[in-house]
Image (spheres, coloured by chain):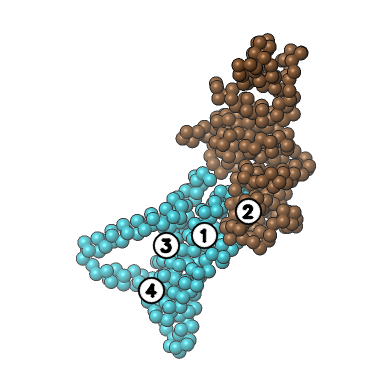
Chain colours: A cyan, B brown
Amino acid sequence: MKGLLIKESFLIWKHGKFMIVLALIYCVMAAIKGGYFFAGFSVVFFSMLPMSIMGMDERSKWDHYAVTMPYSRKEIVLSKYIMTFSGAFASAVLYIISTMIKWYIEKTPGDFMELLRYAALLLALGLMYSAINLPVAFRFGVERGRLWFILVTVLVAAAIGTIISLIETDVSKVGNFIISLPSIAYIAASLILIALSVIISFRIFENKEL
Amino acid sequence: MNALAIRNLTKTYKGFKLDNISFELPKGCIMGLIGENGAGKTTTIKLILDTIKRDSGTIEVLGEDNRKNFKEKKEDIGVVLDEAYFPEGFTAKNVNTVMKNTYKRWDQELFCDYLNRFSLPRDKAFKDFSRGMKMKLAIAVALSHNAKLLILDEATSGLDPIARDEILGIINEYTRDEDNSVLISSHIVSDLEKICDYIAFLHKGKLVFCEEKDVLLERYGILKCSKSDFAAIAPDAIKGKRENSYCVEALVERAEIPTGFSVEKASIEDIILYLAREVTKQ
């Protein structure tokens, strides 16, 4: 699988520089301004990189070629998940580093455990994003997969909104509840979701005729 | 030992069926898979490479079922598809790095030799290559990991005659090692006639014949005669015919033709065209 990962990193380096710079900017903004908005963007940008690479693979029909090489289909699928995991992890680490630099410059040290908790939430967010997106991309292709993702996101958001309004709870209370969960809960939830996602992607890709 | 042994292979799509085909490619030989567009050549190759699932039949590649331990077996197979599917931004240098970490027996020196021989630039982006250069790069990769079986799917189509001739020369050179075998599909019959030991002819998903090229050339001939003379020919000897109001031109089995008739040499293209027409009539 080493060759596949090298190929992915070459492509990310060649075509994803702009997205990496944007993700870095968002990461620094998140550290300077605080809050989840910029940090969330940073993670999503990093997690989107493997999707963009998959789009390029689709255009060049790389997968048709890769299956003729000494790789199993599972390895081809796993290489995408490893890149995704690396992207989300890099984003979380960058968020920690940039926040600590900010603390150092401003000479106002914050709560390190709290920072780790935020970083864990970011990591979980990145993994969940990919856990949902990758099987859809393997099944429908990246372009059609994006449409499906938007559709599913809108439906899920509408369903959550409806449920919240039915039980007459303030949205911020739900948000606060999620944030108050221990970081291990985010990570565990995202890892379970990733495991399910990998199994589904294996099944989809094993049966795909290339 | 056979490099390939295919028995009763069937694959059905909506509107197309690869129907119960069987053939063997002996080790050390070149087999040309000929057929019109849509005849089933690519489907056959995809089934051999197990990138699509067969409905029934068996496929042995280098002595083993291609569903068992095929990941390891793919080390021994060099593949060139109808297009070179490298990522657009890749350079030959990038390809070398990826393949070095893909194939256990990757021979970097040999790959560089091929790059020099094909005059392929090392740092130019793949998207800026001509089709000929792209296919040459794909062939360089297929030949640089000491593969025992080379599978080429329409690798020469769309190339100019000089590039095609160069590629055919390299394929010929590759089989000087008698452990190496080649399956090459094309609809350019003249290319295959130049290099192949065996010809397998697919037509509308059916295998019309799979035979040694020299046997085909020896067995068949073109008979040109008047209609009255043609009436003396045994129907079993006639494999296909074209007639106008004055004369008949037919593909015949040389051995069945009475002495006194002049039978010209048939090319593989003649044989295929006549036989395809007959199969279509049936």
Front residue of A63/B257: it is B257
- Residue B131: which numbered mark, if any? none
Residue under pointer 1 = A53
Q: Using the numbered discs, state the Cα–Cα distance from disc 3 to disc 1 in whole angstroms.
A: 16 Å
| Cα distance between the residues tagged 2 and 1 | 23 Å
Q: Mark on residue A36?
A: 4
Name the residue that disc number 3 marks. Answer: A129
Q: Is residue B23 above or below residue A62?
A: above
Instruction: Using the numbered discs, state the Cα–Cα distance from disc 2 to disc 4 in whole angstroms.
Output: 48 Å
Asked if labels 1 and 4 touch by Cβ distance under 8 angstroms, the answer is: no
Please, what secondary structure does the residue beneath circle 4 have? loop
Amino acid on which the number 2 mark rests in the picture: Ser
Q: Give B65 or B75, whichever is nearer the viewer.
A: B75
Q: Nearer the viewer, mark 2 or mark 4?
A: 2
Residue B143 location in percent, x, y?
71, 49
Q: What residue does disc 2 label?
A: B130
Question: Against B163, is B26 above or below?
Answer: above
In front: mark 3 or mark 1? 1
Q: CA distance from mark 4 to mark 3?
A: 15 Å
Q: Residues within 10 Å of mark 3 (few under 14, many from 20)?
A: many
Answer with mark 3 or mark 1, whichever residue precedes in sequence. Answer: 1
Callout in the foreground (2, 1): 2
Horizontally, residue B107 falls left or right of residue B125, namely: right
Tell me which chain the residue with mark 1 is part of. Answer: A
Q: Do callouts 2 and 4 mark residues in contact (Cβ within 8 Å)?
A: no
Residue displayed at 34% across by 72% down: A180
For the C terminus of chain B, the quadrant is: top right
Residue drawn where x is 69% and y is 47% of the image: B163
